[in-house]
Every structure is written in structure tokens, then in C-alpha cells.
Amino acid sequence: MTKTAYRAVKISEHVYWVGAIDWSLRDFHGYATPHGSTYNAFLVLGEKITLIDTVKSQFKDELLARIASVIDPTKIDYIVSNHTEMDHSGCLPDIIAAVKPEKVFASVNGVKGLPQHFRQGLELTAVADGSTLSLGNLTLQFLETKMLHWPDSMFTYLQEDGVLFTSDAFGMHLASSERFDDELAEETLWEGAATYYANILLPYSGLVQKLAEKLTQLNLPLKLVCPDHGPIWRSRIGQIVRRYVTWAEQKRTNKAVIVFDTMWHSTEMLARAIGEGLTDGGTEVKVLSLAGTPRSEVATHVLDAGALLIGSPTLNNNLFPTVADVLTYLKGLRPRNLMGAAFGSYGWGGEAVKQVQEIMTGMGIEMVGDGLRAQYVPDEEALAKAYALGQEISAKLLAKF
Ligand code: FEO
């Protein structure tokens, strides 16, 4: 494929999508991405021609080719960097060198962070929250969105077209030939958005709630919401904002997620028995074996759960490695309003369940019991206790409604 195969896509009167499609991406710093990703960048054709964000460094030529399908890239006057993370800024120094823009804009924290990434002098201009930038016939307005999800994150709004460029917010890791939400199946769309929220934005849910309030107050006319990953929202803008509000609330639901790994199926037997107890109690259950479930998929299931139960065998007086991994990951994502329990089988020491219990308690999870343990292979009594634990948690979940 030659560079001329890459075309820009017109998305509004003055804006073209000029991003890159990463069909091959399968891992994004520990987040499994079975459907690849996109790095969206946007070209605003004002009297001052402006590029909003760039792409991952290896896709620089694709970005330039898509721009070149509309204009000579050296005609770009301004670049706006909404987010410093390298999937959006990776080729920024190369693009600056190639197009020699008059100015490059970023948030105050972006101006601090970008040079620390590239270890070279970059001439950057900081823009304040609420400030505007004239492109001659068009106006950009900047909205600081600090810690959604980096200190430098900001949104840029093109007033005349009603287009909000939202950096990572409202995005999803999905490589597709479709550019708009209404060109994709609902299931693909909502699963992608939920997975992204659970793995990127969940720790900042309090700020998401404040952002939703701010957007309501600003009452910006929105024709398009353009994240830096995945489809552009044009038909379901209200729905995706409402889903963000719901996910940010993390209300306790009648759904339990059981996560485990196992050495000789004993911890698995406990997981299944707990699951039966929960199911018979009337709770929706997901039983996830870490032998085949990426940590990011676990996080997505936890997003709308009311209870999290984690099982680990004891290996060399310690947690099983995959359980330690998922606990570390989930701890960082800071899920709230969960009930929980720890369980596991052991041969002689049995330390793992206590460790799971301590970590989950430290995460602020409302623990039920002190940790269910069974030596070697669970007998009928141990399985009955596991079933009863499931029933107890189900009853407690239902009592909350
Ligand atoms: Fe898509 Fe925070 O970078």
C-alpha cells in the first residue's frame, strides 16, 4: 500500500479525521486489545489551519498522508496537543519538524510534560481553561480536564461546527473502517466503551461526575464528540454521556464476579460452589478463570458488579502469581461500593487467602467473612460452606435494594 492509499474523512463542515488505524495492537500497557485501536487526529480547516493531536510515532507517515489528501501539510499553522501520552504525541516532534507550525498549544501541564517526554526543546504555548483561540473564521475553546486521565488532559471545542475533541474520554480501543458510532453494532459500541472506561477512567470517577456537571453547565451545542480512540459520536452523544455518569456512580448491583486461578482444580471447585450459591440466591454471576481471562476483561466485568470474590491457591507460602497480578491491577483502578470475599485451597501453609483478604480490605471492599479456606481437595463440608458463602453474599446484595 502506498501512502496515497490513506485518505482523510470529512466529518463536519471544517473538520477532517486524519488519524491512524492500528489493526495489530493486542496489548496497550497491560490492557488487552483484541480488536486493535485507532489514534484519532483531526484537521480543522480554518483560516489558520489546525491539527488537533497527532498519533503514535510509528504511524507518522499515515497521519501525514491523510493530511496530504486534503492539504499540503506544511500549510498547517497550529497544532493543539490535548494529551501528552505517547499514543497521541509520539510523533509530535517529527510533525513539528515536518510542517513547521507557527504555534503549538497544550494545557499548562502539557507544556510541562511534553518536553519531559521528548527531552528536547519544544516551543509550546500554554492555554488556560476556558480560553479561546481564533483561527480567523473559526474559534477553538479549551476545557481543562486535569486527571482525565493525565494531569495534562484537556478538551478542545470548535464552536462553529459544534465539535468537541475529547482526548481519551468517550474513546475505545477498536480498529475499524467505520468512523462513526451509528455505523457500528450497539454491542460492539457499548462493550468497547465500557471496557475503556473500566480500564482507563474508573479511578477518576469522581472527576468524571464533575466533568459531566461542567458540560451540563456549559451547555455547548454538540454535533460531534471526537475521542482520540475509536468511533466519533454523532448519533448517541447523550447516551454515551449518560453511560459515563452511570459508570462513575458505581452503584451496587445484584451481580457478582468470581475471579480465581487454580493449581489442581480445588480452588476452582470452591469458585463453582460459591457461584451456585449466588445463582440460587438470585444473583447474576460471572466466574472468571485467570488462566484464560485478561486482567482488563476482569476489570470490565467488575465495572457494573456489586460483589467481587477472589480465589487463590497458596503457592510457596504466597499468592498465586496471576491472582497477585489481577489484585494489583484492580487496586489501581479503585472500584468502589463493592462487597467481597476471599477464598482458596491450600496444602499446608494456606497464607494466600489471608493475603487476598488483606488486599481486598485495603481496597475498601466490604468483606464478608474472614476468608474461606479448604485443605487439599475440598470435601462436601467445604463445598457446602462455599455454597453458603455464595448464598450469604447474594442475600446481602439483595438486601441493599
Ligand atoms: Fe490514549 Fe492516555 O492515551
Image (spheres, grey):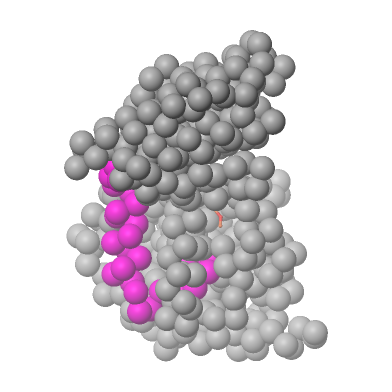
Q: Residue furthest top?
A: 349
Position in image of residue 254 (x %, y %): 31, 45
Q: Residue furthest front?
A: 380
Figure quadrant of the N terminus: bottom right
| Camera-side residue of 345 and 245 | 345
Q: Quadrant of ligand 1?
A: bottom right
> Which residue is found at the position 55% from the left and 50% from the top?
297
**Residue 51 covered by magenta stretch:** no
Figure quadrant of the C terminus: top left
- Res 63 seen here: yes
Q: Decide if residue 162 is on the left or right side of residue 296.
A: left
> Which residue is found at the position 60% from the left and 60% from the top?
88
Splitting the image into 4 quarters, where does residue 157 fall? bottom left
Q: Decide if residue 249 is on the left or right side of residue 74.
A: left
> Which residue is found at the position 32% from the left and 30% from the top?
392
Q: Decide if residue 360 is on the left or right side of residue 253.
A: right
- Res 114 seen here: no
In the displayed structure, 74 sits above or below 299; it is below
Number of marks in the image?
0
In the displayed structure, 341 sits above or below 232; it is above
In the displayed structure, 354 sits above or below 181; it is above
| Camera-side residue of 396 and 360 | 396
Position in image of residue 209 (x %, y %): 29, 49
Position in image of residue 168 (x %, y %): 49, 58
> Which residue is found at the position 61% from the left and 48% from the top?
293
| Camera-side residue of 62 and 152 | 62
Magenta residues (range)? 226-254
Position in image of residue 244 (x %, y %): 34, 57
